[in-house]
Image (cartoon, rainbow, N blue to C red):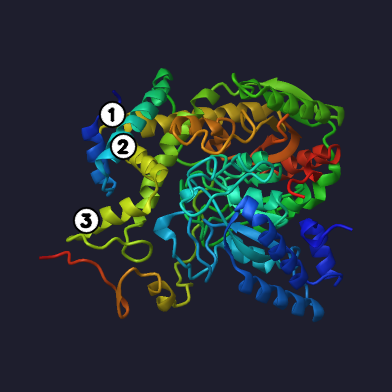
Amino acid sequence: MSALHDLGVREAARRVRHREVSSVELVRAALERIAAAEPQVGAFLTVSEAEALAAAAEIDRQVRAGQDVGVLAGVPVGVKDIICTAGVRTTAGSRILEHFVPSYDATVVSRLRRAGAVVVGKLNCDEFAMGSSTENSALGVTRNPWNGDHVPGGSSGGSAASVSAREVPAALGTDTGGSIRLPAAFCGVVGLKPTYGRVSRFGVIAYASSLDQVGPFARDVGDAALVLEAIAGHDPADSTAAPLAVPSYGDALASGVRGMRLGLPKEYFVEGMQPEVAEAVRAAVTELERLGAVVEPVSLPHTEYAIATYYLIATAEASSNLARYDGVRYGLRVAGGASLGEMYERSRAAGFGAEVKRRIMLGTYALSAGYYDAYYLKAQQVRTLIRRDFEQAFARCDALVTPVAPTTAFRRGEKTDDPLTMYLSDILTISVNLAGLPGLVVPCGFDRAGLPIGLQVIGRPFDEATILRIGAAYEQASDWHRRSPLR
Amino acid sequence: MAITRDEVRRVAALARLRLEPAEEERLTADLDHILEAFERLRALDTSAVPPTAHVEDFSACLRADEVLNPPADEALLANAPARDGRLFRVPKIIE
């Protein structure tokens, strides 16, 4: 019999509903696992033990009273620290918000709670979600659970690492350019970036508003589907949350891939790719063919322009979004300036880290008079071309299958000196954000050093059901997702 | 050079960031390197391509303009770096 902290979401919730285990027992097991694993992993910035135990006790009381406590009945979850939690500090991994305590829950958090989940803590991330390794967090170091010398990926590195290390069975992250999918691949877990508009961002600290999306991490596709179902759907508090019905994602998971048309974009097998990554992804594609899918080559010709397009658009939006951190109403204030303007400048200089300043500067420059047409407008036009590439591919295919990154998890410190090299880690994930599409990552192998490799499945807008079905079919035929780091 | 030190100073002022001389130097080099790499976008003819600002094809879903937030002035003011009763304190802005 497996330990309580090893249980997946569906099994844990089933046991709580059937009173085979209490939510308090599950939460205590998670807290013990967190205490044991954190010295090696460092996924959490805040563990909200008292709040979690109180919430679990309330779930148990409702179960005893015979009430329906929801699909995530009593299950412990972690939440990326860029998502607001009422009464529990929310830092965005930044000095400027180190002591910020939200007065309300983000919609995704209130929906998790409504579905019966218990939030046990807040997970580390790159500052304001800007990064690909979680090394840009100002508040903590997160290590890859498979090898502590390597990064967990980013920006949702704490979320991926906590699920990989069996600290929690599921966690929420955000994905603006790959921030769910890259760490999911690097840590060997399932990660889902939903369609832009599928999930509300109300209460999620904004980085790039035309790209940001919230999604789940879990240890198998069925669990990720269940968490997505709990958090998805229209929200009157977010005008970008689509007014579309949320399907029952679990229903179609077992339908298989027979007859499905899968596109294999040739541009995604890039020069300099680690051979084991290409091999593992090709082997996974062969497996999907064996299961009955029809695979055909497709072309996404503007892929090579995606990095430049993304880093102009995302930084422009970030420069505007982060203008709100001025030291007036909340966040760090550095006193001593004689004027209000000086207070802004000193507070922002002291509160933001190097990468955040770099992106604010790049975005401000791209939007400034004389450069707007050459950079920002140009990037928006190329974004249209990138989007059309996908529309053409999806005219023939039900989904696309690709690698997630050119390599497995790189070493800590390996890319911190050269921002552009770090940006290139996102080369296979960012086009999906620019086009607003859903992308699922499932584990599909390991390299010779024992680091995980992921398979990315990209779907049509609002067609999470199809990519989840493909992921579930592959998972059924493989056992990569059952392997665990840290014994 | 895609960007000069003077331009970095001008942009820092627009972004309300006070930069140390070493930061200015590093940012000039970094932004120059990044913008240089982004020059590749110029190779594409986009004269007939409309821009994409966001991908949604339905218009923003607006709700009725009603106050829904519960009063939370104490919770909000608890995060204030400096306050005076129910007010946020800031340095003097008018002489």
Secondary structure of residue under mark 3: helix
Cα separation between marks 3 and 1: 25 Å
Residue receiving disc 3: A342
Is A403 positioned to the left or the right of A306 in the image? right
Q: Residue at x 36, y 61 (%)?
A: A332
Of the numbered discs 3 and 2, the one sitting upstream in the chain is 3
Task: Determine if residue B51 is in view.
Answer: no
Cα separation between marks 1 and 2: 10 Å
Q: Residue at x 50, y 42 (%)?
A: A131
Tell me: residue A312, above or below residue B62. Answer: above
- Residue A62 found in image quarter: bottom right
Secondary structure of residue under mark 2: helix
Name the front one of labels 3 and 2.
3
Name the front one of labels 1 and 2.
1
Q: Residue at x 36, y 48 (%)?
A: A320
Disc 3 marks which amino acid?
Glu
Extreme residue toward the right, this view:
A1
Dot 2 falls on which chain? A
Q: Residues within 10 Å of mark 3 (few under 14, many from 20)?
A: some
Extreme residue toward the left, this view:
B95
Is A301 positioned to the left or the right of A63 in the image? left
Quarter placement of the N terminus of chain A: bottom right
Tell me: residue A109, above or below residue B84. Answer: above
Is A90 positioned to the left or the right of A28 in the image? left
Q: Are marks 1 and 2 in contact (CB under 8 Å)?
A: yes
Q: Position of residue A76 (x, y in %)?
A: 70, 63
Residue receiving disc 1: B3
Residue receiving disc 2: A365
Dot 3 falls on which chain? A
Q: Position of residue A397 (x, y in %)?
A: 71, 29
- Residue A468 found in image quarter: top right
Disc 2 marks which amino acid?
Tyr
